[in-house]
Image (cartoon, helix red, strand yellow):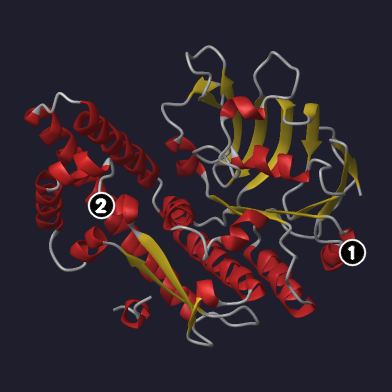
Amino acid sequence: MRQDALAPLAIPANDVSPVLAPVAVAVTRLMLTDFRGYAKARLAVEPGPVVLYGANGAGKTNLLEALSFLAPGRGLRRAKLSEIDRRDQTGAWALAAAVATPAGEIEIGTGRDDVSDSGERRHLRIDGSPAKSQQELAERFGLAWLTPQMDRLFIEGASSRRRFLDRLVTGFDPGHWARLNAYEKALRERARLLRDGPQDPAWLAALEDAMAENGVALAAARVEAVLRLDAACRSAKGPFPRAGLAVEGAVETSVQSMPALAAEEEFRKILRDGRRLDAESGVTQNGPHRSDLLVQHLGTGVEAGSCSTGEQKALLISITLAYAGLSAARRGQAPMLLLDEITAHLDAERRSALFAAILELKAQAWLAGTDAGLFEELRGNAQFFAISRAAIAPG
């Protein structure tokens, strides 16, 4: 990692009575049908943190995954939609949720569309009407998550870090998700055309125009978000490590040094000149689909991938809390947070700091873990549910 890259830049109700005042955004009802191990499930909660506890395999993560479909995309597991159907069932999975927002309650219904040819499309209805796109979810509220699989984020390939960053960027700029989809669609079409032919120059140019326009917009949004996150992480107080952030990529570099139209033309030329090499390799060599998020532990000066497992997780939490605070300030509402096995690798001081930050943000955080005792500090400020064999009981 270049050191200069990280320099700072210019549905039955439960007998729960939460202490907290209502939060800006909160799921109040969740209903599942044929979702993973849940044949039917209904859960009603009040605004405020929610703790899900139970043995491994009990169904905690499945609930968090269901909630993650209140954001655009394929959920926190990135599973094929058909893989989510309850085993031995012929019907497609579905979920419905009521979400309290400052603008009023929203009714959301989504699930696998088993009418489509592939069965890998999901339908979405908001307040009873079909949504034009999943972007409408991001326009209504923000949602972010951390899972045990993400504990390896800094030592895996760049694609996982890009997805993490793009989810945060979408929280700031809901249109980012649609631009990302448009860019990736043009990227796939161009690769297919170069591979299989015929190489129609006019069609290639049109696809490269779409890639240039959307790619520069993606890069600009990433740069702006990382600048904000970097500043927030550098000034953070408390036991979580301060993080230095930068985004590395040729297009991201261009948008910081030239006007957007010039950056588009430069990227367009790179794509045009790279057609032969891209066709031979089968991979588009340049573009924001190859960019990376760089993270450094500012306390030690060590890049995140070389930190201990515990420090890597602490850095992820630090970035996520910074995002939540910035999102709350920018959008006037804290995002929902889904935190699976979040207390693993955290000592008592950092657990307390995490819980305090969630309460201060007034965010509805859904926290899952095997040991209810690790969340005991939240008792009285959070609702507890025991999960056992896909059954949910107030705890």
Task: Please tell me how many numbered marks the rendered image carries.
Answer: 2
Q: On the image, which quarter does residue 34 sit in?
A: top right
Furthest residue toward bottom: 300
Check the picture and name the quadrant holding the N terminus: bottom left
Work out whether 273 lies above or below 88.
below
Residue 285 position in % (x across, y down): 25, 51
Say which amino acid is labelled 2.
Gly
Residues at marks 2 and 1 touching, judged by CB atoms closer than 8 Å: no
**Mark 2, residues whose alpha carbon is within 10 Å: few (<14), some, or many (≥20)?**
many
Residue 263 position in % (x across, y down): 14, 57
Q: Please name the residue that numbered disc 2 is placed on.
A: 287
Work out whether 283 lies above or below 192.
below
Q: Residue at x 15, y 56 (%)?
A: 260
Q: On the image, which quarter does residue 110 sit in?
A: top right
Q: Please name the residue that numbered disc 1 is placed on.
A: 373
Q: Residue at x 49, y 39 (%)?
A: 72
Q: Residue at x 47, y 43 (%)?
A: 138
Q: Is residue 322 left or right of residue 34?
A: left
- Nearer to us in this view, 177 or 162: 162
Q: Does residue 280 appear in the picture of this structure?
A: yes
Q: Residue at x 54, y 55 (%)?
A: 333
**Mark 1, residues whose alpha carbon is within 10 Å: few (<14), some, or many (≥20)?**
few
Say which amino acid is labelled 1.
Gly
Earlier residue among tags 2 and 1? 2
